[in-house]
Amino acid sequence: MSPPQPAPIRTLIVDDEPLARANLRVLLARHPDVSIVGECASAAEAAAAVRNTKPDLLFLDVQMPEGDGFEMLELCGPELPRAIVFVTAYDRYALKAFEAGALDYLLKPFDDRRFEKALARARERLAQGQAGGRREWIAVRSAGQIAFVKQVEIDWVEAADYYACLHTAGKTYMLRRTLAELENELDERRFCRIHRSAIVNLDRVRALVSEEDGEYRVALQSGIRLRLSRTYRKELQSRLGAV
């Protein structure tokens, strides 16, 4: 009996240019393990498609009608695909894309080799999740050594340009990883995203504080207060039993 085949990579293409969507469709057709579950030309349409089709992989343009790619991600909230690849003709959005959780950033026009590299990274990300079980620590390489930071010791994680910062009670560790990559390694039972640039350890949350402007801040036991995005508020409140 042959071993069971892995589930196809459910992929959504979002771009307002028909030619750009067609190009991605042709490139993806070369890979039998990829299943295109939809194509969208606007941010609103794409957010609805994410909720309805639950893709694993998203190829996302930045500039589109009815909101840009970043607004589309905000609309999706915690239902974001685990692998997001931005595809755009503008290099100035790269930093913002990685802060928003992008796995890769394809700058148009790109060649086949660059596309294959992005798809390989997506496969690796998705395979990590299917393997099951997460390490209880995060490896941080710095100054000729490797520090192993236990997940239970992390208070919160912050996006910082192309880096991420692990904040613990006594020290901050910086590593060249995107927030999305770290989120995949963190124990989802313990950690929760509260903003596109921040993840908190639920065990460190002391209170949710309502500010005068109507926004909420997440108060940690350390005294730090972090902005809570409306996109992630409902998810956080539910996980804290504060609904």
Image (cartoon, grey):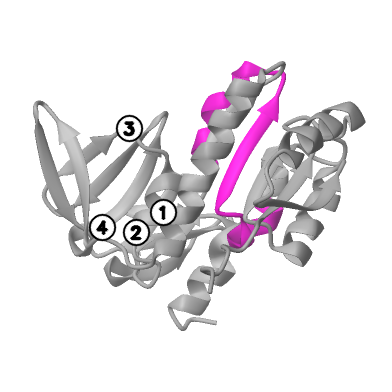
Q: CA distance from mark 3 to mark 1?
A: 14 Å
Bounds of the magenta span? 74-101
Given the image, on which type of amino acid does mark 3 rest? Arg
Which mark lies nearer to you, 2 or 4? 2
Q: Secondary structure at mark 2?
A: loop
Observer able to see residue 97: no
- In the displayed structure image, the side of residue 108 where residue 220 appears, left or right: left
Give the mark nearer the N terminus: 1 vs 4: 4
Give the mark nearer the N terminus: 2 vs 4: 4
- Can you tell which mark lies on residue 97? none
Q: Percent x, y for residue 186?
A: 34, 59
Q: Are marks 1 and 2 in contact (CB under 8 Å)?
A: yes
Given residues 117 and 64, the one toward you in this image is: 117
- Residue 155 placement: quadrant: bottom left
Whether residue 162 is situated above or below residue 140 in the rendered picture = above
**Which residue is denoted by mark 4 in the rendering?**
155
Q: CA distance from mark 1 to mark 2?
A: 5 Å
Q: Residue at x 61, y 55 (%)?
A: 81
**Which residue is denoted by mark 3 in the rendering?**
176
- In the displayed structure image, the side of residue 194 where residue 10 appears, left or right: right
**Which residue is denoted by mark 1 in the rendering?**
183
